[in-house]
Amino acid sequence: MPNIKSAKKRLITNEKARVRNKGKITVLRSTEKSLREAVEASEMETAQKLLATVFNKLDKAVKAGIIHKNKSARKKSRLSALLKAKK
């Protein structure tokens, strides 16, 4: 446990940010999973809509600093390729 006042405050702020980021990452992963399931089930219209949603969530995660921009680009590329290969 920190003794300095600013360190105590950082501990509290870091925990709040961790919880907030965890929620956003969970939503992102579940949306990505539903996209993969739609592709596996050959529901292309649903998958196309979900692809746009996943892209949007990835961009927002990058903007918020939750994930790195290259990770976002890699995920977008792989998901697009998955959808294209299944068509």
Image: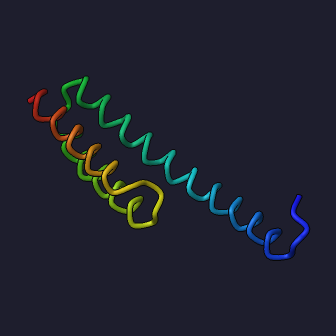
> Between residues 8 and 47, which one lies in front from this camera angle?
8
* Number of numbered discs overlaid on the protein picture: 0
Please state if 72 lies on the left or on the right of 24 as rendered: left
Please state if 24 lies on the left or on the right of 16 as rendered: left
- In the current view of this chain or complex, which residue is farthest to the top? 41
| Rendered residue at 63%/56% (across/down) | 18
- Above or below residue 63? Residue 35 is above
| Rendered residue at 35%/54% (across/down) | 58
Image quadrant assignment for residue 67: bottom left
> Between residues 29 and 34, which one lies in front from this camera angle?
29
Question: How far across and down, in percent of the image, does residue 21 sit?
Answer: 56, 56
- In the current view of this chain or complex, which residue is farthest to the bottom? 6
Please state if 35 lies on the left or on the right of 43 as rendered: right
Image quadrant assignment for residue 77: top left
Question: How far across and down, in percent of the image, does residue 2 sit?
Answer: 87, 63
> Between residues 63 and 32, which one lies in front from this camera angle?
63
- Above or below residue 79? Residue 42 is above
Q: Quadrant of the N terminus?
A: bottom right
Image quadrant assignment for residue 41: top left
- Above or below residue 57? Residue 50 is above
Q: Quadrant of the C terminus?
A: top left
| Rendered residue at 17%/41% (across/down) | 80
| Rendered residue at 56%/52% (across/down) | 23
Question: How far across and down, in percent of the image, does residue 54 sit?
Answer: 31, 49
Question: How far across and down, in percent of the image, does residue 59 sit?
Answer: 33, 60
